[in-house]
Image (spheres, grey):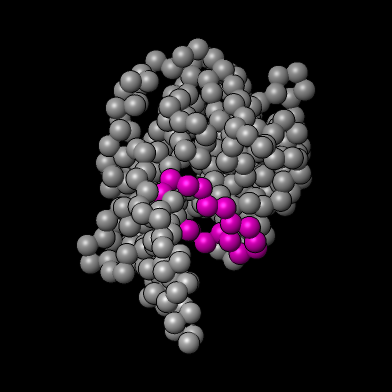
Amino acid sequence: MRTVAEVGSKLFHKMIPQAAEREKFRTILAAHAGKIIQVHAAGVCIPWEALYLAEHVASATHSDFLGWNHVVTRTVSFPYGRAEEVVSVPIKKVGLVEDERLPSVRTRKAQGTIDHLASGIVKVALKPLLTPPDREDFLEFFFDEFEPKQAIQFDCHVHIPHSVHTSHMQVTRRFPLDFDTFKEVEMPDQPFVLFNACSGGSVEWDDTEGYAGSLHAAGAVSIVAAEADLGDGFMTDFAASFYSLNRVSTTVAEALLMARRLKLKVQKNPSALFYSLYGDTRYRLIGGGGPSVLPTLKQLTDLVAPVWPPQPGPEPDYRSNRRKTELGQA
């Protein structure tokens, strides 16, 4: 926690050098706790949620990170229209792109995370890619004319030797998928995507061109993506929590914030700050199969009660700030 706070504090001070402006920024954020922050522009992929807002990090606490109270959504190119209100989508079928070497994939724990949303969801795994011609199987995996997939989950590794353009995704031992392949992906069914691949969100802070951005541009309506190397065990655990909390939340953004706050407060694990949202925030996952067995809705409600909802602070006195500015200019 302390290490992440130190890095987040340096970045915050670099972005806003003046102490008075940092205080104003903190006050505005506190007054709108629980609200979604949208960023539009190239170079918006810094780890906003990990910004540490307190002036000093000597006694770092989880509640001083920007991501404790807010979800920051990165808005990048999208080929379809955006929803004007919350869209509830029953998840009946999920596509799985998996790295066979991961322990969570071998034990089927990664596949089992979707069961926390609902039982009976059909799971379809991409068959192992062994030779270059299998690249076409990957591209065709997202087309399903008769039984479309409402969700896609990636459980794999992204290897980045120099930049996003020299990177690749390892989905099997024998055959990697280079970044250019993702530019050819088309997702006309507009699925939700959970991108559980280390550093698979934004590969470079100063560039929105990354795997999550490419999938959003391909048609994925909403993407939750890991922004750092978080570890297979944590990522599987986070996915299970996220899917569970969709059952008591109103949108994927709210479920993401609930899951993050639980991990920060209960597990004291700052890794939760490195999951970001790309795309539409007015998207809601609901179980299209049978009800999930565990946990029950009451157990979920009791679980999040200590951290939900976020408590807004007082509204800033903008008139007072304007008077101070006018007096200073005089």
In the picture, measured across the screen, residue 99 lies left or right of residue 182, that is left
Q: Where is residue 174 in the image (x, y as percent from the top left)?
A: 61, 42
| Residue reaching furthest to the left | 59
Query: Quarter of the image containing the N terminus?
Result: bottom left
- Whether 120 is drawn above or below 163: the answer is above
Q: Position of residue 10 (x, y in %)?
A: 39, 71
Residue 122 found in image quarter: top right
Q: Position of residue 208 (x, y in %)?
A: 63, 58
Q: Is the magenta stretch mostly helix, strand or loop?
A: loop
Q: Is residue 30 visible?
A: yes
- Whether 288 is drawn above or below 209: the answer is above
**Residue at 50% across / 12% down in the picture?**
290
- Does the magenta portion include 45? yes
- Whether 243 is drawn above or below 328: the answer is above
How many marks on residues? Answer: 0
Residue 43 found in image quarter: bottom right
Q: Position of residue 268 (x, y in %)?
A: 28, 48
Residue closest to the eye, 272 or 184: 272
**Residue at 63% across / 51% down in the picture?**
75
In the picture, measured across the screen, residue 183 lies left or right of residue 176, that is right
**Residue at 58% across / 61% down in the picture?**
44
**Residue at 72% across / 36% down in the picture?**
187
Residue closest to the eye, 227 or 126: 227
- Does the magenta portion include 119? no
Residue 109 found in image quarter: top left
Q: What stretch is highlighted in magenta?
A: 33-48
Q: Is residue 234 visible?
A: no
